[in-house]
Image (cartoon, rainbow, N blue to C red):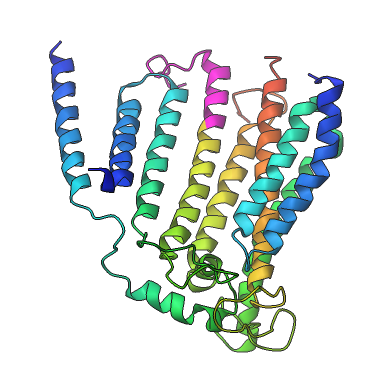
Amino acid sequence: MRMSKIVRTAADILYPAILIFGLYVVAHGHLTPGGGFQGGAVIATGGALVIVAYNYKEVTGWLKKNVLMGQEVIGLFGFIGVGLLALAFGQVFFFNYLAGSGSLFGMPVPYGINPGELNTAGVLPLMNFAVGIEVWGGLTIVILYMLSGLEKEGC
Amino acid sequence: MLWNLPFITVVVLTFIGLVTVLLKKNIIKILLGINILESAVNLFIVALGYREGGVAPIFTLAPSELMVLPTPQALVLTSIVIGVATSALVLSFAMVLQKKYGTVDIDKIRRLHG
Amino acid sequence: MKKMLVVGASLIILAAFFGVMAMTLSFGSPKMTDMDDYFLRHGQEQTGSNNECTAVVFDFRGFDTLGESTVLFCAIVGVALMFRKMQGGEEYEDE
Protein backbone atom coordinates (compact mmCIF):
# COMPACT_ATOMS: atom_id res chain seq x y z
CA MET A 1 0.00 0.00 0.00
CA ARG A 2 1.12 3.55 -0.58
CA MET A 3 2.48 5.62 2.24
CA SER A 4 1.58 9.32 2.79
CA LYS A 5 2.93 12.18 0.73
CA ILE A 6 5.62 13.13 3.24
CA VAL A 7 7.15 9.64 3.26
CA ARG A 8 7.12 9.41 -0.55
CA THR A 9 8.79 12.81 -0.98
CA ALA A 10 11.46 12.01 1.60
CA ALA A 11 12.24 8.67 -0.09
CA ASP A 12 12.53 10.44 -3.45
CA ILE A 13 15.06 12.91 -2.08
CA LEU A 14 17.06 10.43 -0.02
CA TYR A 15 17.55 7.68 -2.63
CA PRO A 16 20.21 9.42 -4.81
CA ALA A 17 22.11 10.57 -1.71
CA ILE A 18 22.26 7.00 -0.33
CA LEU A 19 23.32 5.71 -3.75
CA ILE A 20 26.23 8.15 -4.01
CA PHE A 21 27.36 7.50 -0.44
CA GLY A 22 27.34 3.74 -1.06
CA LEU A 23 29.39 4.12 -4.26
CA TYR A 24 31.87 6.32 -2.33
CA VAL A 25 32.30 3.59 0.31
CA VAL A 26 32.88 1.01 -2.46
CA ALA A 27 35.33 3.12 -4.46
CA HIS A 28 37.58 4.11 -1.53
CA GLY A 29 37.88 0.56 -0.22
CA HIS A 30 41.67 0.56 -0.22
CA LEU A 31 42.08 3.81 1.74
CA THR A 32 39.36 4.04 4.40
CA PRO A 33 37.28 1.41 6.24
CA GLY A 34 34.80 -0.11 3.82
CA GLY A 35 35.07 -2.13 0.65
CA GLY A 36 32.86 -4.17 -1.63
CA PHE A 37 30.49 -5.94 0.77
CA GLN A 38 29.85 -2.99 3.06
CA GLY A 39 29.14 -0.55 0.23
CA GLY A 40 26.83 -3.00 -1.52
CA ALA A 41 24.77 -3.39 1.66
CA VAL A 42 24.43 0.41 1.97
CA ILE A 43 23.07 0.71 -1.58
CA ALA A 44 20.62 -2.17 -1.03
CA THR A 45 19.28 -0.31 2.02
CA GLY A 46 18.45 2.65 -0.25
CA GLY A 47 16.55 0.30 -2.55
CA ALA A 48 14.60 -1.09 0.43
CA LEU A 49 13.55 2.47 1.39
CA VAL A 50 11.99 3.03 -2.05
CA ILE A 51 10.25 -0.37 -1.95
CA VAL A 52 8.68 0.36 1.44
CA ALA A 53 7.38 3.81 0.44
CA TYR A 54 5.57 2.86 -2.78
CA ASN A 55 3.04 0.36 -4.11
CA TYR A 56 4.27 -2.97 -5.50
CA LYS A 57 2.97 -2.32 -9.02
CA GLU A 58 4.80 1.01 -9.27
CA VAL A 59 8.09 -0.37 -7.95
CA THR A 60 8.23 -3.12 -10.60
CA GLY A 61 8.05 -0.34 -13.18
CA TRP A 62 11.35 1.12 -11.99
CA LEU A 63 13.42 -1.69 -10.47
CA LYS A 64 13.11 -4.51 -12.99
CA LYS A 65 13.97 -8.04 -11.93
CA ASN A 66 15.89 -8.92 -15.12
CA VAL A 67 18.24 -5.96 -14.78
CA LEU A 68 19.05 -6.75 -11.15
CA MET A 69 19.64 -10.44 -11.91
CA GLY A 70 21.95 -9.46 -14.78
CA GLN A 71 23.85 -7.15 -12.42
CA GLU A 72 24.48 -10.01 -10.04
CA VAL A 73 25.78 -12.33 -12.77
CA ILE A 74 28.05 -9.60 -14.19
CA GLY A 75 29.49 -9.00 -10.71
CA LEU A 76 30.43 -12.63 -10.07
CA PHE A 77 31.90 -13.23 -13.54
CA GLY A 78 33.79 -9.93 -13.42
CA PHE A 79 35.42 -11.01 -10.16
CA ILE A 80 36.54 -14.35 -11.65
CA GLY A 81 37.62 -12.66 -14.91
CA VAL A 82 39.92 -10.20 -13.15
CA GLY A 83 41.58 -13.16 -11.43
CA LEU A 84 41.90 -15.20 -14.62
CA LEU A 85 43.47 -12.27 -16.48
CA ALA A 86 46.59 -12.77 -14.36
CA LEU A 87 47.19 -16.07 -16.19
CA ALA A 88 47.71 -14.10 -19.40
CA PHE A 89 50.64 -12.28 -17.78
CA GLY A 90 52.46 -15.47 -16.92
CA GLN A 91 51.73 -15.43 -13.14
CA VAL A 92 49.50 -17.52 -10.87
CA PHE A 93 45.72 -17.14 -10.41
CA PHE A 94 44.71 -13.99 -8.43
CA PHE A 95 48.14 -12.36 -8.72
CA ASN A 96 48.23 -8.57 -8.25
CA TYR A 97 49.72 -7.61 -11.62
CA LEU A 98 48.88 -3.89 -11.49
CA ALA A 99 50.50 -2.89 -8.17
CA GLY A 100 53.70 -0.85 -8.55
CA SER A 101 53.63 -0.75 -12.36
CA GLY A 102 52.86 2.46 -14.21
CA SER A 103 49.47 1.61 -15.71
CA LEU A 104 45.84 1.95 -14.49
CA PHE A 105 45.99 1.79 -10.68
CA GLY A 106 49.72 1.43 -10.28
CA MET A 107 51.40 4.23 -8.37
CA PRO A 108 53.85 2.96 -5.70
CA VAL A 109 52.77 3.76 -2.15
CA PRO A 110 55.04 5.77 0.24
CA TYR A 111 56.00 3.70 3.26
CA GLY A 112 54.47 4.42 6.69
CA ILE A 113 51.65 6.71 7.74
CA ASN A 114 50.45 8.96 4.90
CA PRO A 115 47.31 10.68 3.57
CA GLY A 116 45.99 8.28 0.97
CA GLU A 117 46.25 8.40 -2.84
CA LEU A 118 43.41 7.04 -5.00
CA ASN A 119 45.71 5.86 -7.78
CA THR A 120 47.33 2.98 -5.86
CA ALA A 121 46.63 -0.67 -5.02
CA GLY A 122 46.46 -2.43 -8.36
CA VAL A 123 43.71 -4.98 -8.85
CA LEU A 124 41.93 -4.23 -5.56
CA PRO A 125 39.58 -1.37 -6.70
CA LEU A 126 38.40 -3.46 -9.69
CA MET A 127 37.57 -6.37 -7.38
CA ASN A 128 35.79 -3.96 -5.00
CA PHE A 129 33.54 -2.71 -7.81
CA ALA A 130 32.69 -6.23 -8.98
CA VAL A 131 31.71 -7.41 -5.49
CA GLY A 132 29.78 -4.19 -4.78
CA ILE A 133 27.65 -4.58 -7.90
CA GLU A 134 26.98 -8.23 -7.07
CA VAL A 135 25.83 -7.54 -3.50
CA TRP A 136 23.66 -4.59 -4.66
CA GLY A 137 21.80 -6.70 -7.21
CA GLY A 138 21.53 -9.73 -4.95
CA LEU A 139 20.11 -8.12 -1.81
CA THR A 140 17.58 -5.96 -3.70
CA ILE A 141 16.26 -8.91 -5.66
CA VAL A 142 15.71 -10.96 -2.48
CA ILE A 143 13.42 -8.20 -1.12
CA LEU A 144 11.54 -7.94 -4.43
CA TYR A 145 10.89 -11.68 -4.68
CA MET A 146 9.64 -11.95 -1.12
CA LEU A 147 7.26 -9.03 -1.72
CA SER A 148 5.92 -10.67 -4.87
CA GLY A 149 5.34 -13.90 -2.94
CA LEU A 150 3.14 -11.99 -0.48
CA GLU A 151 1.07 -10.27 -3.14
CA LYS A 152 -0.20 -13.48 -4.68
CA GLU A 153 -2.33 -14.56 -1.73
CA GLY A 154 -3.48 -11.09 -0.76
CA CYS A 155 -2.18 -11.37 2.82
CA MET B 1 36.15 -10.85 36.40
CA LEU B 2 35.58 -7.69 34.38
CA TRP B 3 38.77 -7.97 32.34
CA ASN B 4 37.30 -10.93 30.44
CA LEU B 5 33.98 -9.22 29.62
CA PRO B 6 33.84 -9.99 25.83
CA PHE B 7 34.30 -13.71 26.47
CA ILE B 8 31.63 -13.77 29.17
CA THR B 9 29.24 -12.11 26.69
CA VAL B 10 30.08 -14.79 24.13
CA VAL B 11 29.22 -17.53 26.63
CA VAL B 12 25.88 -15.93 27.57
CA LEU B 13 24.88 -15.43 23.92
CA THR B 14 25.83 -19.00 22.97
CA PHE B 15 23.75 -20.36 25.81
CA ILE B 16 20.69 -18.30 24.85
CA GLY B 17 21.02 -19.31 21.19
CA LEU B 18 21.39 -23.02 21.94
CA VAL B 19 18.39 -23.10 24.28
CA THR B 20 16.23 -21.32 21.68
CA VAL B 21 17.16 -23.68 18.85
CA LEU B 22 16.57 -26.81 20.92
CA LEU B 23 13.39 -26.00 22.82
CA LYS B 24 11.13 -23.81 20.68
CA LYS B 25 8.41 -24.97 18.28
CA ASN B 26 7.96 -22.04 15.88
CA ILE B 27 10.12 -21.85 12.75
CA ILE B 28 10.64 -18.08 13.01
CA LYS B 29 11.88 -18.39 16.62
CA ILE B 30 14.30 -21.16 15.65
CA LEU B 31 15.66 -18.90 12.91
CA LEU B 32 16.21 -16.09 15.42
CA GLY B 33 18.12 -18.55 17.63
CA ILE B 34 20.39 -19.45 14.70
CA ASN B 35 21.08 -15.73 14.17
CA ILE B 36 22.01 -15.23 17.84
CA LEU B 37 24.42 -18.21 17.66
CA GLU B 38 26.13 -16.74 14.61
CA SER B 39 26.52 -13.35 16.31
CA ALA B 40 28.16 -15.04 19.30
CA VAL B 41 30.68 -16.89 17.12
CA ASN B 42 31.56 -13.73 15.15
CA LEU B 43 32.13 -11.78 18.38
CA PHE B 44 34.39 -14.55 19.68
CA ILE B 45 36.60 -14.55 16.58
CA VAL B 46 36.98 -10.74 16.54
CA ALA B 47 37.72 -10.54 20.29
CA LEU B 48 40.57 -13.03 19.90
CA GLY B 49 42.57 -10.60 17.79
CA TYR B 50 42.84 -7.59 20.08
CA ARG B 51 46.10 -6.07 21.29
CA GLU B 52 46.35 -3.72 24.28
CA GLY B 53 46.38 -0.07 23.16
CA GLY B 54 46.15 -0.87 19.45
CA VAL B 55 44.36 1.04 16.69
CA ALA B 56 42.63 -0.10 13.47
CA PRO B 57 45.07 -1.58 10.89
CA ILE B 58 44.77 1.27 8.38
CA PHE B 59 47.78 3.39 7.39
CA THR B 60 45.82 6.48 6.23
CA LEU B 61 46.45 9.12 8.95
CA ALA B 62 46.85 6.52 11.70
CA PRO B 63 47.48 7.80 15.27
CA SER B 64 50.17 5.27 16.19
CA GLU B 65 52.12 2.29 14.89
CA LEU B 66 50.75 -0.44 17.21
CA MET B 67 47.90 -2.16 15.34
CA VAL B 68 45.48 -4.99 16.02
CA LEU B 69 45.56 -8.21 13.97
CA PRO B 70 43.76 -7.94 10.57
CA THR B 71 43.19 -11.65 9.85
CA PRO B 72 40.22 -12.33 12.21
CA GLN B 73 38.37 -9.35 10.71
CA ALA B 74 38.68 -10.86 7.22
CA LEU B 75 37.27 -14.21 8.39
CA VAL B 76 34.34 -12.52 10.18
CA LEU B 77 33.42 -10.60 6.98
CA THR B 78 32.93 -13.89 5.18
CA SER B 79 30.95 -15.35 8.06
CA ILE B 80 28.50 -12.43 8.24
CA VAL B 81 27.69 -12.68 4.52
CA ILE B 82 27.08 -16.42 4.81
CA GLY B 83 24.74 -15.75 7.73
CA VAL B 84 22.71 -13.36 5.58
CA ALA B 85 22.41 -15.98 2.82
CA THR B 86 21.25 -18.66 5.29
CA SER B 87 18.60 -16.38 6.82
CA ALA B 88 17.21 -15.44 3.39
CA LEU B 89 16.79 -19.09 2.40
CA VAL B 90 15.12 -20.17 5.67
CA LEU B 91 12.68 -17.23 5.50
CA SER B 92 11.60 -18.13 1.96
CA PHE B 93 11.11 -21.77 3.07
CA ALA B 94 8.90 -20.55 5.94
CA MET B 95 6.74 -18.50 3.53
CA VAL B 96 6.14 -21.42 1.18
CA LEU B 97 5.44 -23.81 4.09
CA GLN B 98 2.85 -21.45 5.55
CA LYS B 99 1.09 -21.25 2.22
CA LYS B 100 0.91 -25.05 1.83
CA TYR B 101 0.18 -26.24 5.41
CA GLY B 102 -1.52 -23.20 6.95
CA THR B 103 0.70 -23.17 10.07
CA VAL B 104 4.35 -22.69 11.10
CA ASP B 105 4.36 -25.14 14.00
CA ILE B 106 6.94 -27.86 13.40
CA ASP B 107 4.95 -30.48 15.29
CA LYS B 108 2.17 -30.24 12.69
CA ILE B 109 4.34 -30.19 9.57
CA ARG B 110 5.28 -33.83 9.64
CA ARG B 111 3.44 -35.49 6.78
CA LEU B 112 5.10 -36.01 3.42
CA HIS B 113 3.02 -35.91 0.24
CA GLY B 114 2.95 -39.41 -1.17
CA MET C 1 8.40 -34.41 34.56
CA LYS C 2 11.43 -36.62 34.19
CA LYS C 3 12.14 -35.14 30.75
CA MET C 4 12.29 -31.64 32.24
CA LEU C 5 14.73 -32.80 34.94
CA VAL C 6 17.06 -34.37 32.39
CA VAL C 7 16.93 -31.28 30.15
CA GLY C 8 17.58 -28.93 33.09
CA ALA C 9 20.53 -30.98 34.37
CA SER C 10 22.21 -31.17 30.97
CA LEU C 11 21.79 -27.40 30.48
CA ILE C 12 23.45 -26.70 33.83
CA ILE C 13 26.40 -28.96 32.94
CA LEU C 14 26.75 -27.15 29.59
CA ALA C 15 26.70 -23.71 31.27
CA ALA C 16 29.36 -24.78 33.79
CA PHE C 17 31.63 -26.08 31.01
CA PHE C 18 31.28 -22.82 29.06
CA GLY C 19 31.94 -20.76 32.19
CA VAL C 20 35.18 -22.57 32.98
CA MET C 21 36.32 -22.10 29.38
CA ALA C 22 35.61 -18.36 29.44
CA MET C 23 37.76 -17.78 32.51
CA THR C 24 40.95 -19.33 31.15
CA LEU C 25 41.27 -17.10 28.05
CA SER C 26 43.29 -13.87 28.25
CA PHE C 27 41.96 -10.75 26.57
CA GLY C 28 44.41 -8.31 24.99
CA SER C 29 47.48 -10.43 24.35
CA PRO C 30 47.17 -12.98 21.54
CA LYS C 31 49.62 -15.86 21.69
CA MET C 32 50.90 -16.51 18.14
CA THR C 33 51.11 -13.45 15.90
CA ASP C 34 53.79 -14.42 13.36
CA MET C 35 51.58 -14.37 10.26
CA ASP C 36 49.90 -11.07 11.15
CA ASP C 37 53.24 -9.41 11.92
CA TYR C 38 54.38 -10.35 8.41
CA PHE C 39 51.14 -8.95 6.94
CA LEU C 40 51.49 -5.65 8.82
CA ARG C 41 55.18 -5.22 7.98
CA HIS C 42 55.20 -6.15 4.27
CA GLY C 43 51.57 -5.62 3.24
CA GLN C 44 51.89 -2.02 2.17
CA GLU C 45 54.73 -2.47 -0.32
CA GLN C 46 53.58 -5.81 -1.75
CA THR C 47 49.94 -4.93 -2.42
CA GLY C 48 50.19 -1.12 -2.54
CA SER C 49 47.11 -0.34 -0.42
CA ASN C 50 46.75 1.58 2.84
CA ASN C 51 43.95 -0.59 4.24
CA GLU C 52 45.31 -3.83 5.70
CA CYS C 53 41.92 -5.54 6.11
CA THR C 54 41.06 -5.09 2.41
CA ALA C 55 44.54 -6.28 1.43
CA VAL C 56 44.09 -9.46 3.52
CA VAL C 57 40.54 -10.11 2.25
CA PHE C 58 41.18 -9.57 -1.46
CA ASP C 59 44.87 -10.22 -2.00
CA PHE C 60 46.46 -12.49 0.60
CA ARG C 61 43.29 -14.59 1.10
CA GLY C 62 41.46 -14.17 -2.19
CA PHE C 63 40.16 -17.74 -2.38
CA ASP C 64 37.97 -17.29 0.70
CA THR C 65 36.32 -14.27 -0.94
CA LEU C 66 35.76 -16.28 -4.13
CA GLY C 67 34.03 -19.05 -2.16
CA GLU C 68 31.90 -16.55 -0.27
CA SER C 69 30.72 -14.81 -3.48
CA THR C 70 29.72 -18.19 -4.90
CA VAL C 71 27.75 -19.09 -1.76
CA LEU C 72 25.88 -15.75 -1.84
CA PHE C 73 25.07 -16.20 -5.54
CA CYS C 74 23.73 -19.74 -5.05
CA ALA C 75 21.58 -18.72 -2.08
CA ILE C 76 19.98 -15.87 -4.06
CA VAL C 77 19.28 -18.19 -7.01
CA GLY C 78 17.65 -20.56 -4.50
CA VAL C 79 15.37 -17.81 -3.18
CA ALA C 80 14.39 -16.86 -6.74
CA LEU C 81 13.51 -20.48 -7.54
CA MET C 82 11.13 -20.85 -4.58
CA PHE C 83 8.69 -18.21 -5.86
CA ARG C 84 8.05 -19.51 -9.33
CA LYS C 85 4.60 -19.85 -10.92
CA MET C 86 3.92 -23.19 -12.54
CA GLN C 87 1.88 -23.17 -15.73
CA GLY C 88 -1.05 -25.56 -16.09
CA GLY C 89 -1.33 -28.12 -13.29
CA GLU C 90 -0.31 -26.76 -9.89
CA GLU C 91 1.41 -29.47 -7.84
CA TYR C 92 1.53 -32.69 -9.80
CA GLU C 93 3.89 -32.58 -12.74
CA ASP C 94 2.90 -35.72 -14.60
CA GLU C 95 3.33 -36.11 -18.31
The answer to whether residue B63 of the structure is visible from this angle is yes
Instruction: Classify residue A54 by image quadrant.
Output: top right
Residue B97 part of the magenta-drawn span: yes
Which residue reaches farthest top?
C1
Q: Is residue C4 positioned above or below C56 on the image?
A: above
Horizontal side, residue B114 vs residue C7: left or right: right
The answer to whether residue A77 of the structure is visible from this angle is no
Q: Nearer the viewer, residue B70 or A73?
A: B70
Residue under the image location 74 percent in, 34 percent down: A49
Q: Nearer the viewer, residue B55 or B99?
A: B55
Q: Position of residue B59 (x, y in %)?
A: 55, 72
Instruction: Classify residue C3 by image quadrant.
Output: top left
Residue B82 part of the magenta-drawn span: no
Q: Magenta segment, which residues?
A: B91-114
Horizontal side, residue B21 vs residue A68: left or right: left
Horizontal side, residue B73 vs residue A64: left or right: left
Image quadrant holding the N terminus of chain C, namely top left
Q: Is residue B38 positioned above or below B69 on the image?
A: above
Q: Position of residue B97 (x, y in %)?
A: 52, 22
Q: Is residue A126 positioned above or below C19 on the image?
A: below
Q: Position of residue A113 (x, y in %)?
A: 56, 76
Q: Is residue A32 positioned above or below A93 on the image?
A: above
Q: How many marks?
A: 0
Q: Position of residue C6 (x, y in %)?
A: 14, 21
Instruction: Classify residue C82 by image quadrant.
Output: top right
Q: Nearer the viewer, residue A16 or A139?
A: A16
Residue under the image location 60 percent in, 82 percent down: A87
Residue under the image location 35 percent in, 32 percent down: B17
Horizontal side, residue B62 vs residue C13: left or right: right
